[in-house]
Image (cartoon, helix red, strand yellow):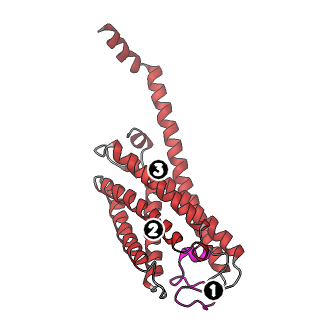
Amino acid sequence: MMRVCEGVRRRSSPTSALCVGASVTRGAVRMRRSALALLGSWLGFLGFTALSMRLYPGGNWVEPRAAGHRFLYNFFCDLTQPVSLSGVDNRLGSAFARVGMWCFALALGAFFWLVPFLFTGRVSARVRVWVRGLGLGAVLGVALVPLLPSQRFGPFHGLLALTAAGLGTLAALLAVVALWRGQGSVRFLGWLGALALAVGVFDAALFAQHLSDHAPTPLLVPAAQKVAAFLLSAWMVGVACCVLRSDPTRLTRRP
């Protein structure tokens, strides 16, 4: 009994409290840096993608001879093609597009690492692990997609994109359900994530349906991709801002 009591006193000693405080501080610093990295990577995605759009010679799956980039007609992956769909050299623009995609992958990785900190204490640690593990798989897929352009790798490019989307969908679904159990801005982020998830699943289903078609891809598919990307970006940025505004002590004490 004395040993137990001594252990309790040791755990509650000033030195122990200082260690816990230092641990919380380090955790808060890592979280803040991760949130800022998410925002910075997302801004990098916007900047490099905008440059690649500006440099894209032209061509899309509906109008192969169209001049220049068309926001609702072109997929993001079209920008990573070293030769545009119109048959013109696009090596410089594709390099910017690949960097932009990798920036997005970094932002997505930071997002899946951060979002479990917003879960309430009622959410099990296993759910947090699954969100981060499935999210990591999605991030790896997103990072590999620009290296396997559809003009050279054909259906394998689409299958890899769908695999990454599937892993990301599962991770996002778990995160949405967990966020719904929160209150205030956390629950709002859950609803925003649900909307992004619904549009993303709709776009992925359309993409899969037309993956093996020889006919031109309908305009609805790349247009839905842009809406899904906008909603996902809003969700990611919202999570980062929520983490930056939250009490770091409350967040870092969660499992």
Residue 217 position, x and y percent, is 47, 84
Identify the residue position indicated by label 1 in the image: 58
Residue identified by numbered label 3: 113
Q: Is residue 134 left or right of residue 95?
A: left
- What element does badge 2 sit on? helix
Residue at mark 2: 162
Does 203 appear above or below 123? below
- Report the magenta residues as a range: 58-79
Q: Nearer the viewer, mark 1 or mark 3?
A: 1
Secondary structure, mark 3, is helix
Image quarter (top left, top right, bottom left or bottom right) of the C terminus: top left
Q: Tell me where residue 7 appears, x and y as whole percent.
A: 37, 15
Q: Is residue 186 above or below residue 90?
A: above
Asked if the magenta segment contains residue 59, the reply would be: yes
Which sits earlier in the primary sequence, circle 2 or circle 3? 3
- The percent position of residue 164, horizontal first and vertical second, equals 47, 62
Label the magenta part by its dominant secondary structure: loop
Q: Quadrant of the N terminus?
A: top left
Q: Amino acid at mark 1?
A: Gly
Measured Cα–Cα span from mark 1 to mark 3: 37 Å
- Residue 154 coordinates in the image, percent (x, y): 55, 75
- Mark 1 or 2, nearer chain start: 1
| Amino acid type at image mark 3 | Trp
- Depth order, front residue of 65/118: 65
Residue 124 vertical placement versus 232 (above, below): above
Tell me the CA gap for discs 2 and 3.
22 Å
Given this view, does label 1 or label 2 mark the residue nearer the observer? 2
